[in-house]
Structure formats: C-alpha cells, structure tokens
Amino acid sequence: MAKPFASSADLGEKEQTLEVLADGVYALTAEGDPNVGAIEGEDFLVCFEALATPVAAREWLTRLREHTGKPIRYLVLSHYHAVRVLGASAFGADVIVTHDKTRELIAERGEQDWASEYARMPRLFKEPESIPGLTWPTATFSDTFTIDLGGDRGDLVLAYCGRGHTEGDLVAWLPRHRIMFAGDLVESQAALYTGDAFHREWSAGTLDRVASFGAETLVGGRGAVARGKAGVEAAIAQTRDFLRVMLREVGAAGTLKEAFRNAHRALEPRYGSWPIFEHCLPFNVSRLWDELHGVERPRVWTPERDREVWGELQS
C-alpha cells in the first residue's frame, strides 16, 4: 500500500512544552514539530523563529507572555523555510534578522517553498489565510551579528557557520549561559531534512564550527533540548552520522532508486521511529543524488516536483 504523501496524514496535535533554560531564556518544543525560542534583553525581547502562520505564532506568544511582557525588538530567522518564517507578522518586531543568503533565497524561491511546505505539512499551517505574504528581513549579515542585551545580560551573537541545511543557516549563541539555538543545523532525536542541503560541507566544517562554540545547552530545529556537554555532543554526532550514512549509501548507488533503498535500509534501524523520517528521506536522497552528480545548488521544490519524487521513491 502506498504511503501517505509526506506529512499529509500527520494530523494529530503535538504536546508543546515551554522550558525555561536560564533566567530569561525560553524554548518551546513540540514532539518533533519545529522548535522556537526567546531571549530577554534588559527591556526588550529577541524571538527565534516564527512558525508557519501568524495564528500558530500567536499561540506561542500567548504562552511566552505568561513569563514576560517585554516588547519584541528582534525576530531572528535561522533560514528561509516556510514553516520557520511565515508567522513573522504576529511578532510586530522592530527588526527581522536573517543571513544575507536567506534573503536571497526568499527572493529566489520563497513562493515555491511556501506552496511546497503547505502541501507536505498542512497541520503546521494553522489558518493559512492569516499569512499576509512572504516574510522579508529588515537586517542581514554575512558572518556575525551581535545584539547587546543590555544591563548584565551580555550579548546574543548570531553566527554563520557555513553551508548546511540551506545556504543561509545561522545559529544564535548566548556566551553567558553557553546556550545555542542551532536551527535545523542540528536535530536532537529527530530526523534531518536535507532537501536543500550541502551534505558534504554540513557534515564536516559546518558542524565543526557549531561544535567549536562549546555549548552546554542546545535547542535544535526539532526534538528535545540537548542538555549538558555530553548531550550537546550527542546531538551534533547524531546529525553528523545521519549525513555521513547518507553520503556513503547514496554515493555507492548506481541509480536514484537504489540510492533511496540503500539509504533507507541503513538509516531506518536507528532513525526510522524519529519524527519526519519517512517524510523527509525521498527529498533528502533526491537532493544528495543531485549534489553528488554535479548539481551545485539545490533545485527548487514545488508541489508538482514533490509529488513526482515521492511517487518515484516512496510509493
């Protein structure tokens, strides 16, 4: 029997958990749904990620407002994917920050990605009619962007670690607390989506740079918060292992279908029960196959291409 397309059959609500990671540092996790966070400055807030719609974002902000009433000055978006950015209007942020490449990707393929992700993950798009349009950053950077949190709260450093999950991923680093919000560059007990990735760079230098911060708490793009040095190292190692297994199996295959079968067989025992594994793998393998055969930049995903790849590999 054919498997339901992507996450189209995943309609059950996930339990959300708001965690206070340190004084004024918050994370919202949801059983493998996209994670979000917030950091208090002296008299303002920095929010990290925007969710898929303003309605979904307002539900998160209602919970956050149980802890702080400070106005939102900055909204930081780790990359361009629709489920991370289209809820931005709910925040009323003075400044929306992304990496330079993320702005370029929104211009190049934001509309197509919106349509693609809505079809793949409809449950995340609560009241999609509330989305006013594409989200555009008002500030971008190439290497680092530092936010002075004021008082004795220290700095929040936004950093580019290299190409990985996309061309423009950033991490948010709190040196005072040794807390990192890593976006989808690291997942903790959740499968990777690599359909827009640069697998070789991500698995090597990019993750090396993420690890070099020495975080003691890490909020990945999905999954549980990684706690303690050992927990953070395990999350980074899991991410690296997933990528390396894909590189090995897809690289050894003679056809795209063989690549998918081999990657699925190698990854499924460890990762098959984790969130979005079956959803992501056809798109992951398709992108890696292209990458290993000379397609430098990821091809644009559309609902039509999504269905074509799914039908070829996952049916």
Image: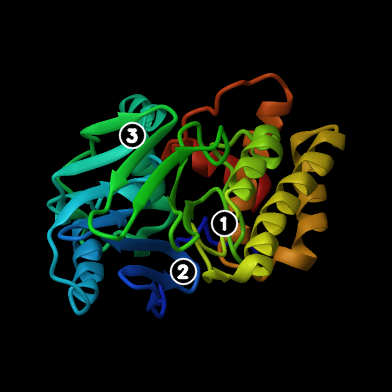
Q: Nearer the viewer, mark 3 or mark 1?
A: 3
Task: Kindly state the secondary structure of the residue where label 1 is placed.
Answer: helix
Q: In this view, does 177 lie to the left or right of 36?
A: right
Residue 44 in the image: above or below residue 296: below
* The one of 17 and 52 positioned closer to us in this rendering: 17
Quadrant (top left, top right, bottom left, bottom right) of the N terminus? bottom right
**Looking at the image, which residue is at 61% across and 21% down?**
296
Residue highlighted by disc 1? 279
Residue highlighted by disc 2? 10
* The one of 175 and 93 positioned closer to us in this rendering: 175
Task: Kindly state the secondary structure of the residue where label 2 is placed.
Answer: loop
The numbered mark, 2 or 1, whose residue comes first in the sequence reads 2
Residue highlighted by disc 3? 110
Separation of residues labelled 3 and 1 (CA atoms): 21 Å
Rendered image quadrant of residue 303: top left
Q: Does the CB distance between marks 2 and 1 fall below 8 Å?
A: yes
Separation of residues labelled 2 and 1 (CA atoms): 10 Å
- Measuring from the top left, give residue 90's x and y in whole percent: 15, 56
Q: What residue type is labelled 3?
A: Gly
- Measuring from the top left, give residue 57's x and y in whole percent: 24, 62
Residue 200 in the image: above or below residue 282: above
Q: Which amino acid does label 2 sit on?
A: Asp
